[in-house]
Image (cartoon, grey):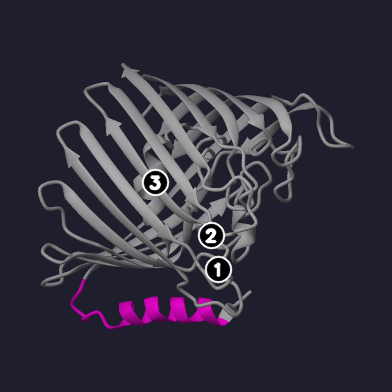
Amino acid sequence: MNEPRNLRLHTAILACMATLPAHAEMEVTPYGSLRIQTEAVSVDDAKPGEDDSHTALRDAYSRLGVTATYKDLDWVDLDATVEFPINSALLRAEDPTFFQAYYKGNNKPRVADIAATTENLGTLRVGTQWLAYYNTVAYPVDFFSSYYSGWATQATFRRDAATYTTPSFAGLTATVSAVDLTHEAGSNYLDTWQYALSWAFSDVTVGVAYQDTEQDTGDNADQLGASLVYAPGNWRFAAKVEQLQTNDSTVLKDDPVTYNLYGSYSWNKYTVKAMFANGDESDEAAAFYQGDSYQLGLDYQYSEALKLFVEYFYEELGYAIYTPNSRFDDILAGYHVDSDGQAVSLGLRYDF
């Protein structure tokens, strides 16, 4: 773990805030979201020592954070955010998927960034943030409420990055981002580049993105993705496709493709959702998602702050259904093992 890099990043953010003029007024807003579910899961054959089925409580991405905003500067608006993951089922500050453990540590901030925005020049964002490739390609189909939302992708969600986004020109927005993808000793800090274009017009949004992945070893796969959203009235239809572009000559099934189809309809306080996803089976190391998965959901917006949800999730190959009270990525059937895994979730989301 390269702590000096962390110190440089956080020191830079603090230094930027310290240079603000004394007359600038700061608006500080705390926020949070409690998201928890009870679930019943089963797989055809669990790993040795594990039961094939269980019921448990599982966190669904609870978080606590605070934003600070300066809006009265002459030519630029400044926004800073610090947000921590909260595993409400285990009462710990940690990412419930444990993906963060591969980066800096499982209890590190989900978000810790500062952004400068101007009307004519766009936005520069520095710090731990949601990444441009995910925002453009994977987010359009990441609309479920349970813990099982957003898994059917090869995208990395959050990392340290320096990101520039242009102003919107006739609905067209461009983004370029330098990303610390690996946080490995001996590699450059911002080791990966992401590029994204998004075009929004009427009820349609089209996005394309490319990830030029860290190449210190020369073997890491690049990523190319596209998304399409059509959202007329109470309907929402979305699709995405991703291709890993293999750079390792030893891979037998190279350049695997993933695609997702999503649809939802809202009426009164209800929203019904459905998604199908498929990922090519491959020995490419970056091919996290493989096989088929299905997801169905129903949300009930009880009040402005409180949402209730019930969802069904199916995975052909093991990747998202964990053992109860997992302390790491302890997948119930084993990683990419034939599982026919199923999960039924009943939960709530309370925003404050």
Name the residue: 60% across, 66% down: 104
Name the residue: 60% across, 32% down: 291
Side (left or right) of 210 relative to 109: left
The amino acid at mark 2 is Asn
Does label 1 or label 2 sit earlier along the sequence?
1
Residue 157 shown in magenta: no
Disc 3 to disc 2: CB gap under 8 Å: no
Q: Which mark is residue 303?
A: none
Query: From the viewer's perspective, is the residue at label 1 or at label 3 nearer?
Result: 1
Quarter of the picture holding the C terminus: top left
SS category of the residue bearing label 1: loop
Residue on which the image places disc 1? 218
Does label 1 or label 3 sit earlier along the sequence?
1
Give how far apart the Cα atoms at labels 1 and 2 are. Answer: 7 Å
Quarter of the picture holding the N terminus: bottom right
Disc 1 to disc 3: CB gap under 8 Å: no
**Neighbourhood count class around disc 1 (C-alpha, 10 Å): few under 14, some 14–19, many 20 upward:** few
Residue on which the image places disc 3? 225
Is residue 200 something one can see in this rendering?
A: yes
**Neighbourhood count class around disc 2 (C-alpha, 10 Å): few under 14, some 14–19, many 20 upward:** some
Residue on which the image places disc 2? 247
**Neighbourhood count class around disc 3 (C-alpha, 10 Å): few under 14, some 14–19, many 20 upward:** many
In this picture, which residue range is highlighted in magenta?
Answer: 4-24
Give how far apart the Cα atoms at labels 1 and 3 are. Answer: 21 Å
Disc 1 to disc 2: CB gap under 8 Å: yes
Residue 318's spot in the image, x, y percent? 69, 35
